[in-house]
Image (cartoon, rainbow, N blue to C red):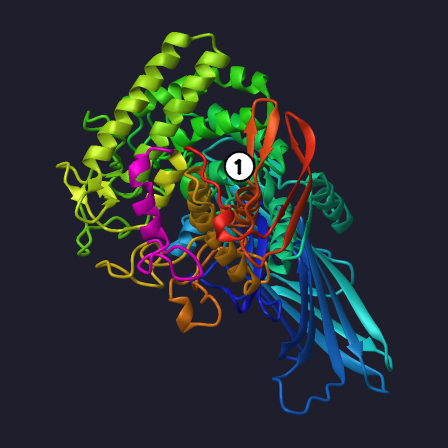
Amino acid sequence: MTDLVSILDGNTFLVSDRRGDIEPSFDFPTGLFSFDTRFLSTWLLTLNGERLHALSIDDAESYRTRFFLAPGEPTHYLDAKVSVIRSRAIGGSFHEELTVLNHSGDTVEFTLRLDIGADFADVFEIKHARQKKGRTTASVNGNELRLTYRREAFHREVAITTSEPGEIDVAGMTFRIRIGRHGEWTTRLHVATVVYGARGEDIRATLPFAGSRDVATIMAEQNELIERAPKLGCDCEPLATAYRCSLNDLAALRYESIALGVRLLAAGLPWFMTLFGRDSIFTSLQVLPFLPELIPPTLQILAGLQGYRLDDFRDEEPGKILHELRYGETAGFEEQPHSPYYGSADTTPLFVILVDEYERWTGDSQLVLMLESAVRGALEWIDTYGDLLGTGYIWYQTRNQETGLPNQCWKDSLDSISYADGRLPGFPRATCELQGYAYDAKIRGARLARAFWNDPEYADRLEREAAELKQRFNHDFWIPDREYYALALDADGRQVDALASNIGHLLWSGIVDETRAGRIVEHLLGPRLFSGWGVRTLGDDQGRYNPIGYHVGTVWPFDNSIIAWGLWRYGYREEAGRICDAMLSASHYFDGRLPEAFAGYERSLTEYPVRYPTACSPQAWSTGTPLLLLRVMLGLEPQGEHLIIDPYVPEGMGRIELLDIPGRWGRVDALGRSRTPTDARRPNP
C-alpha cells in the first residue's frame, strides 16, 4: 500500500493511486467501499486526454486529502502551463472538488474528463474474483450519473452529481472549459452510496450520515473523542507521535452499524472494515485505560449476537462469541458464512476477560449485571462445545469445510500452526494461548460471580477448574528438553513443538508456572524470536520460518503489546521495556502508525523495519498498541477504587507524563522517568 492513498470515515473508505485515480483491480481493494461493497471501481481523471502526475499530496488527516497534479509525465525540467488541485473528503458520502488553474498569460480551453465505473464487487470477490450474478445499469438525469446493481432483493446504488454543467454519459463526465489568463475553474462532485436490502429484506438505508456529515462535522467528532483521552507529555518523540496517530485513527475507525444502530470500531483498512470479535476485544483491552466509553457498545453487540444454536455453515454454537460480521452480497446470499460467522475459538473466553477488565477499570457494575447471562453462556461454551475431545482443553475444527476457517486462533492463516520441522498437524487443534485465555476467563468469571452475581458456589467451581487447568496444562504442553510450551496439541494429544510468539500470551493469561516464567522470557527476548524490532511470530530456526510470511516470521505490533503486558505481569519490567522501546522505534519509520505487521528481518540487517506488502493500515489492534505500551511502562493497574501507578520507563526514553487517566477513581495523573535495569521490581503474578 505504499504507493496508494486512502481516506476513511468509519467503514466507508476510498483507496486510490498517488494521482487520486482509481482503476479496476481484483488484486487489491482500490476504490470507494462501504459495508463490504465497492461502489466505485473506476475514477480516472484526464486533462486534454493526458493522465496527470502528482507534484505533492497532503494526506495528514484520515478523512480528507489533496492532490496537486500536473499533466504528462514528470521530467527533469517541468514548465507546466496548467495544474489541477484535487481535494476530497469522506463523511458518509464522498466529496471531491476539482480545480483547474491556468498559469499562462492567455485564455486557454481545456477538456477535462472523469471516467466513472462501479463493479459493485463484494470485498470477498476482490480476494477471489467471481462472475457477478446480478445486473448493473446506468442512467443519466440532468447533472447526475446513477449506477445501480440488483440481484433479487439485494440492491446497491451510487449517484454522482456535479455542481457545474458538463456532458454526462453512462461512463463518466466531460467538461469543456475555458479559463482566462491566470484564472481557475472548479466543480464539486458528490458521490452518494445507497444500500437497499440484504438477505431478501426490504430495507432501505442510506449509508451513515450520507450527505449530512461535512468535513467540519467529522473534525468536530474526532476532536471531541481525542479531547476526552488523557493528555500525554513526554521526551520521546516517537511515543508522542504514535500516541497522537493512535487517537486519530481510533476516531476514524469508528463506524455506525447499518443494522445494529451503535458505533463500533472497524478492525482495519482495507480488508477488515467491519466488526471482528477478536480484534474488537483486544483493541478494547488496549484502549480501556484511555477511552473506556468505547467499550460498552462492543460488549453489548457481541453479547446480543452470541451464538444460540448449532449451525455448521456459520460454525455457530450456543454461548459462542462471533468472529466476523459482514454486510456484502456474498454474505447476504450465504455464499460466505459471515452473517455473522463464529469461526474463532478465542473470542469467547476473551469476551469474559474484557467484561471483567472493564468493570475493574470503570466500576460499571450495571453492565456486569446486564451481561451475566452472556458471560455464563461463554463460560459454559468453554467446557462444552469448546472442548471438542473432552480433554479439558479448547479445541477447534471447522464444520464448514467449503468456506469455514481452518485455523480458528488469532494466527488464522493456513500454515500458521506447525511442528518445528514445518509439518502441519491435523484437526482438531488445541493451541496453547487458547488454554491461557480459558484459565484467565475462569479466574475472572469467578470474581464476577462472587462480587456481583451472589453465586459463591459457582465462583468456587470456576476457581477449582482454573487451578486444575493450570496444573494439567503445565504438564501436557511443557517440552522439558527445550524448556518452552508447545504451540499446540494435535488430535492425538502430541505436542506441536514449534517455538512461536504464542508463549507470550501465556504470560499475559497467568497460566505459566512461576518457576518456568524466566525461561519463557529468555526465549521471547532471545535471538530466535526477537528481531530487535519486536518478537517474531515464529522462531527463525523453525521449519516454516519466513520473515515475510504472514504468521510465520513477521512481527505483529498487537502481539508484542500483549507479550509486553505478560512480561509486566510476571515482573519482568526491563524486558517489557525492551519490547516497548523496539515497537516505538519501529513506529518512527511508519510515521507513527504501526501497521498490521512488518517483516521479521534481524535489526542488524536493516536500518528500518521492512514493510509487509499487504499489511492493513490503519488496523485497530495495531492502533491500540502504543496505548497498551504506555500502560505497561507506567505500570497502571486498577486495585479496588484506586489506580496503582508503578512506572518502569526504558533507558533513554526520559519523562512520560499522562494526565487525566479516567476510571472508577475519577481522573488521576501518572508520571514516570527512565530508570536503570537494576531498578526493576518483580511483583508476584
Left or right placement of residue 432 versus residue 198 in this view: left
Residue 348, given in percent of the width and then of the height, sits at: 39, 29
Q: Which residue is drawn at 53% across and 25% down?
A: 300
Magenta part of the protein: which range?
510-537
Q: Residue at x 49, y 45 (%)?
A: 680
Q: Tag 1: residue type?
A: Ser
Q: Is mark 1 on a helix, strand or loop?
A: helix
Q: Which of 62 and 512 is in front in this view?
A: 512
Q: Residue at x 39, y 19 (%)?
A: 377
Residue denoted by label 1: 284
In the rendered view, would you say 253 is above or below 456? below
Q: Look at the image and tell me whether residue 309 can be seen.
A: no
Q: Is residue 157 magenta?
A: no
Q: Nearer the viewer, residue 464 or 538?
A: 464
Q: Is residue 522 magenta?
A: yes
Left or right placement of residue 218 versus residue 520 in this view: right
In the rendered view, would you say 56 is above or below 7? below
Quarter of the image that includes the C terminus = top left
Residue 527, given in percent of the width and then of the height, sits at: 33, 60
Q: Look at the image and tell me whether residue 55 can be seen.
A: yes
Q: How many labels does the image show?
A: 1
Q: Counting other residues with Cα less than 10 Å from the Cα at mark 1, is it few (<14), some (14-19), or many (20 or more)?
A: many
In the rendered view, would you say 513 is above or below 533? above
In the rendered view, would you say 3 is above or below 254? below
Q: Nearer the viewer, residue 222 or 192?
A: 222
Left or right placement of residue 572 versus residue 482 in this view: right
Helix, strand or loop: magenta stretch: loop
Residue 648, given in percent of the width and then of the height, sits at: 54, 46
Q: Residue at x 27, y 40 (%)?
A: 431
Residue 540, given in percent of the width and then of the height, sits at: 29, 61
